[in-house]
Image (spheres, rainbow, N blue to C red):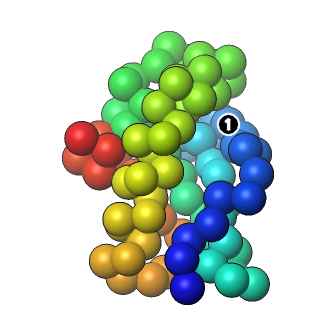
């Protein structure tokens, strides 16, 4: 099945300095994290991270589809190399 993005939900992970978002492959939930370097190294804090994620949303979604197809796992972490 294809990886689907049915909603725009995302959340800031303060401890990991990354943004979490969830997608679906059929009925299976797949968790993704976008690290700071994948988000153009935003300033610390929730608002800058979420704004950077929103600005790069399509690139992040494209990268998450590609990395997911390389090998299916329950959790993925996107880096700058993945979204380049």
Instruction: Kindly identify which residue carries mark 1.
Output: 12
- Name the image quarter holding the N terminus: bottom right
Is 58 displayed left or right of 54 in the figure? left
Q: Residue at x 48, y 41 (%)?
A: 58
Residue 74 in view here: no
Residue 3 x/y as whole percent? 56, 71
- Name the image quarter holding the C terminus: top left
Is 5 displayed left or right of 68 in the figure? right
Is 26 displayed left or right of 62 in the figure? right
Q: Residue at x 47, y 31 (%)?
A: 56
Q: Residue at x 47, y 19 (%)?
A: 42
Residue 8, quarter of the rendered image:
top right
Q: Where is 24 relative to 13, above or below?
A: below
Q: Where is 77 relative to 68, above or below?
A: above
Residue 40 in view here: yes
Secondary structure of the residue carrying numbered label 1: strand
């Amino acid at each position: 099945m294809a990886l689907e993005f049915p909603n725009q939900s995302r959340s800031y992970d303060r401890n990991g300095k990354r943004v979490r978002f969830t997608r679906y492959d059929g009925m299976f939930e797949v968790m993704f994290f976008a690290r700071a370097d994948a988000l153009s190294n935003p300033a610390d804090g929730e608002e800058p991270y979420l704004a950077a994620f929103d600005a790069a949303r399509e690139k992040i979604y494209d990268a998450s589809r590609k990395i997911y197809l390389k090998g299916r796992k329950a959790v993925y972490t996107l880096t700058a190399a993945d979204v380049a």
